[in-house]
Image (spheres, grey):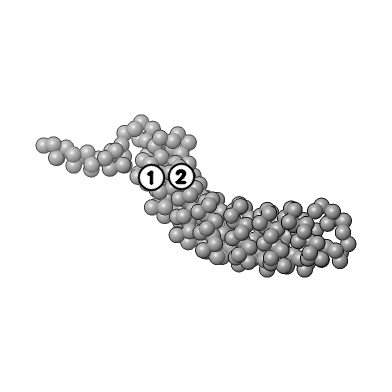
């Protein structure tokens, strides 16, 4: 198949010859002429061999949902080669983030602000929170769910949530995550002085309520 790179221009445009080459190795597509690169069946065959062949397909095929689905079966990194239209396809991106939450980094900005997609991504990999739109990094429920799976995801939460008592409670056992916590709450978390029944640090009001209940 490597011999294709030394073939004449006319032979590189010969679909039968290119098809035989990609049957051996999908990367042979890189030496194909424009016509074979725009041949959907031939590109599907190449991508089936290796998702990396996608980068050599014609632009319209890099935006073809069927071709991308074939590539996604192998590695979500194929989205690096995808056309812009595909990165706006929520259904396709849902498939990708369910395989690897980090695929969220390739989504169009509009989809990085889509709560359903971000929730699916952070469920698969809490650290995918870093690729979410700022407004979702400030979404308390999303962040709480993420840090409960991996406290280090707190690094990508909005500053306002790093002072949220319940979120701080969720990362109490992780020294690295605690360094990101607001100072006054970090002291309480490190000393372990909190109200575990409410999953928050005890406030004066909560102690007063308890004292009244014991009277």
- Between 150 and 98, the residue placed more toward the observer is 98
Q: Which residue: 68% across, 53% down?
A: 50
Compared with residue 73, is residue 88 higher up or lower down, i.e. above or below? Answer: below
- Checking the image for residue 154, the label placed there is 2
Circle 1 Cα neighbour tier, 10 Å, few/some/many (<14 / 14–19 / ≥20): many
Residue 28 point in image, percent of width and height:
77, 56
Label 1 element class: helix
Left or right: residue 93 versus residue 209 is right
Circle 2 Cα neighbour tier, 10 Å, few/some/many (<14 / 14–19 / ≥20): many
> Do the numbered discs 1 and 2 sit on residues whose CB atoms are within 8 Å?
yes
Quarter of the rendering containing residue 26: bottom right
Which residue position is annotated with label 1? Answer: 167
Residue 94 point in image, percent of width and height:
51, 59
- Between 67 and 200, the residue placed more toward the observer is 67
Q: Which of marks 1 and 2 is nearer the N terminus?
A: 2
Residue 201 point in image, percent of width and height:
31, 39
Res. 124 visible in picture:
yes
User: Marks 1 and 2, Cα distance to the nearest angstrom?
Assistant: 8 Å
- Checking the image for residue 107, the label placed there is none
Q: Which residue: 40% across, 48% down?
A: 144
- Between 41 and 173, the residue placed more toward the observer is 41
Residue 4 point in image, percent of width and height:
83, 57
Quarter of the rendering containing residue 7: bottom right
Label 2 element class: helix
Q: Which residue: 14% across, 40% down?
A: 213
């Amino acid at each position: 198949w490597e011999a294709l790179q030394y073939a004449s221009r006319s032979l590189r445009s010969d679909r039968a010859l290119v098809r035989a080459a990609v049957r051996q190795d999908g990367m042979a597509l890189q030496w194909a002429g424009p016509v074979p690169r725009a041949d959907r069946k031939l590109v599907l065959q190449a991508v089936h061999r290796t998702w990396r062949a996608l980068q050599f397909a014609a632009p319209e095929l890099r935006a073809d949902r069927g071709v991308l689905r074939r590539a996604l079966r192998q590695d979500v990194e194929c989205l690096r080669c995808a056309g812009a239209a595909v990165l706006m396809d929520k259904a396709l991106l849902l498939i990708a983030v369910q395989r690897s939450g980090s695929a969220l980094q390739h989504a169009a900005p509009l989809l990085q602000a889509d709560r359903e997609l971000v929730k699916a991504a952070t469920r698969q990999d809490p650290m995918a929170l870093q690729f979410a739109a700022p407004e979702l990094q400030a979404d308390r429920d999303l962040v709480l769910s993420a840090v409960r799976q991996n406290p280090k995801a707190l690094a990508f939460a909005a500053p306002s949530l790093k002072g949220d008592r319940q979120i701080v409670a969720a990362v109490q056992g992780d020294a690295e995550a605690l360094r990101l916590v607001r100072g006054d709450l970090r002291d309480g978390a490190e000393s372990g002085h909190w109200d575990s029944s409410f999953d928050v640090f005890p406030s004066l009001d909560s102690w007063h309520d308890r004292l009244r209940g014991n009277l």
